[in-house]
Image (spheres, rainbow, N blue to C red):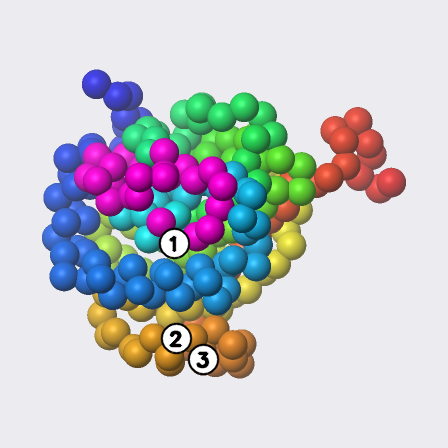
Amino acid sequence: MKPIRPGSELPEDLQKLYTTRFTGHENYRNRIWKLLTSQFFSKWVKPADAVLDLGCGYGEFINNITADKKYAMDLNPATRKQVGPNVEFLEQDCSMPWPFEDNSLDIVFTSNFFEHLPTKKVLLLTMMEAHRCLKRGGRLIALGPNVKFLPGSYWDFFDHYLPLTELSIAELMNLSGLQVEQLVDRFLPYTMSMGQQPALWKVGLYLKLPLAWKLFGRQFLVVGRKPVLSDNTPSGE
């Protein structure tokens, strides 16, 4: 039996929760992520990159992004059947040591995951693992609901534990040794692929109109980069 940290959900709980939550939305979610990866997130991911989808859910990001080496990490055992055959699935607690060498990943991507972690300590340990495994110049791309713009509905999901904002994520990245490269307080709408299902052309247009993000965005986007400088080089040089 795999070790589970106290306070985190058991795999069987996750499987039941997400089956209930996402059943009937799988096709639309996949089409949305195909669009998001091709029209937005691909600007940070090169075809030769090694990419980890952290807290990957049903693998919509990692299945659709173009990369040489693709990994997906989640505690939900049902995810194994959802990721593509070219994706290596890692069923483990994200705050435990990851099975990667130091400086081996180009991109760590995570969407709507950090708020599900049981404690800030677990989140910090997870972020430290991301820093360890990223290559110098590698990036952590974090997307998630911004509690500043969701004071009540943030808690409509039973498995939300940590209230987070773009600034708290940025501070955590800095604490972990990552340099914040992009900070967006309002990016995507909240639960965009579970409630209303706007036409894909509307979503594509939305991605090109940052002014619209200010009106409808409820999720942050924070991109952190592992410094290229060597550990022995003073940051001021």
Magenta stretch in the rendered image: 63-88
* Vertical relation: 200 (above or below) 92: below
The residue indicated by pointer 2 is: 203
Kind of residue at badge 1: Asn
Report if residue 183 is visible in the image.
yes
Please state if 100 lies on the left or on the right of 103 as rendered.
Answer: left
Q: CA distance from mark 3 to mark 1?
A: 20 Å
Please check the rendered image and state whether residue 8 is part of the magenta-colored stretch, yes or no.
no
Q: Position of residue 153 (x, y in %)?
A: 28, 65
* Vertical relation: 65 (above or below) 232: below
Q: In which quadrant will I find the N terminus? A: top left
Earlier-in-chain disc, 1 versus 2: 1
Q: In which quadrant will I find the C terminus? A: top right
Please tell me whether mark 1 sits on a helix, a strand or a loop: helix
> Residue at 38% across / 70% down in the picture?
189
Kind of residue at badge 2: Val
Q: Residues within 10 Å of mark 1 (few under 14, many from 20)?
A: some
Q: Is label 3 in contact with label 1 (beta carbons under 8 Å)? A: no
> Residue at 73% across / 39% down in the picture?
228
Report if residue 191 is visible in the image.
no
Q: CA distance from mark 3 to mark 2?
A: 5 Å
Q: Is label 3 in contact with label 2 (beta carbons under 8 Å)? A: yes
> Residue at 36% across / 39% down in the picture?
86
Q: Position of residue 118 (x, y in %)?
A: 33, 38
Please tell me whether mark 3 sits on a helix, a strand or a loop: helix
Q: Residues within 10 Å of mark 2 (few under 14, many from 20)?
A: some
Q: Residue furthest top?
A: 1
The residue indicated by pointer 1 is: 64
